Amino acid sequence: MKTKRLLSLDIMRGMTIVCMIIVNNGGGPQSYRHLGHSAWNGITVCDLVFPFFLFIMGVTTYISLAKTGFAPSSVSLRKIFRRTVLIMLIGWAIHWFANVCYGKGWLDFGHLRLTGVLTRIALCYGVVSLMALSMSRRAMGVTAAALLIVYGAILLLFNGYENDLSNVNAVVDRFLLSEGFLYTKRPVGPEGILGTVPAIAHTVIGFCCGALLMRKESLEVRLLKLFVVAALLLVGGFILSGILPENKRIWSPSYVLITCGMAAALLAAISYFTDVKGYRKGMAFFESFGVNPLFLYVLGDIAGIILGATHARQVIYDWILGWSVVPELASAIYAVSLMLVCGLVALPLYRRRIYIKI
């Protein structure tokens, strides 16, 4: 099954990676509110970055598997398994590298964080891909809805909104893994095991939007339908937030619906201007990040770790502070500068059409 490539997907994915690098690499202890995650309930700009990536991953997973007609062949199963394991191993390797850089020892595997962004990306990709090869699109949608309903009930029944160790997410994490393998800066880890359940439903929503985008209709009609879906998701999410407030750390059902709605609306808007109207001036920068997303995300993480461990980050941050700027601006300048350095790698790869697949 041949599908026409939508430039908007690469652009939006690139925008997401650019923002990921910026929000993950603040130079100092003080940052602008929207460049940091919400303390608990609520959504900042920073809280939109990861869910947007999972949504786009769902869309592109549909497009990728559609090329083989969703046939569960040994080749496709091996590819899914290999990519899932590779992404997970890279995530763990980054945590190990950070431990080594900050003096925990080369062989200290007892403090290796097993949960994290790349672990969640790997699990969502793997599970949703296997669902796509074994279930109809309708069954996937029903399953996603069921996962959100069950997870929402669990949050309400078992202290899901308590920001302490009694939270069901913290309880499950500590029951399944020792504390050395977990995120310990807060009582409730941001990429915990139980929270991956709604994240899978989140990716399925992106997958179903991908199915809508690839239907045999004019692109304008498909984008109009995507806008309608976005509006329904947003309305449903805001209504649900009265019972289950939007919360990134526990990946609440309302957070899933609201962020998927925002992502769908943004994708439809970008696609209208780039794929329909052909307005592409200045988009090459974001596209360069979008065609090598995970590689550049990993590059940004490794660069941030090295700069932090060698104290170069503090030196650069103090130098920026010397310009008589406020600490929040100095932190943002540092983060944007690191992202632009990654861009010096992204653009040559893009111009030479070198795509590093992970």
Image (cartoon, rainbow, N blue to C red):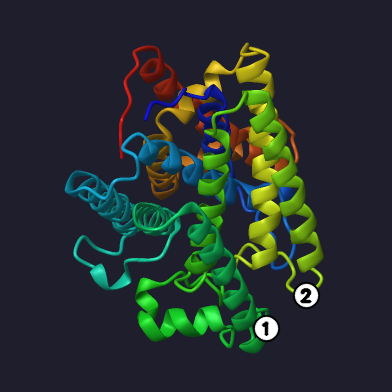
From this view, report whether residue 9 is shown above or below residue 137. Answer: above
C-alpha separation, residue under disc 1 versus residue under disc 2: 9 Å
The answer to the question of whether label 1 and label 2 lie on touching residues, with beta carbons closer than 8 A, is: yes
274 sits left or right of 293 in the view: right
- Whether residue 30 appears in this view of the structure is no
Which of the pair 322/280 is nearer the observer? 280
Instruction: Identify the residue at horizontal 44%, vertical 47% (top origin).
Output: 308
Which of the pair 9/63 is nearer the observer? 63
Report the amino acid beneath label 1.
Answer: Leu
- Whether residue 213 appears in this view of the structure is yes
Label 1: which secondary element = helix
- Asked where in the image residue 258 lies, by quadrant, the reply is bottom right
Label 2: which secondary element = loop
| Residue where numbered disc 1 is placed | 156
Q: Earlier in the sequence, mark 1 or mark 2?
A: 1
Which of the pair 338/122 is nearer the observer? 122
| Residue where numbered disc 2 is placed | 243
Q: Where's the N terminus, which quadrant?
A: top left
Q: Where's the C terminus, which quadrant?
A: top left
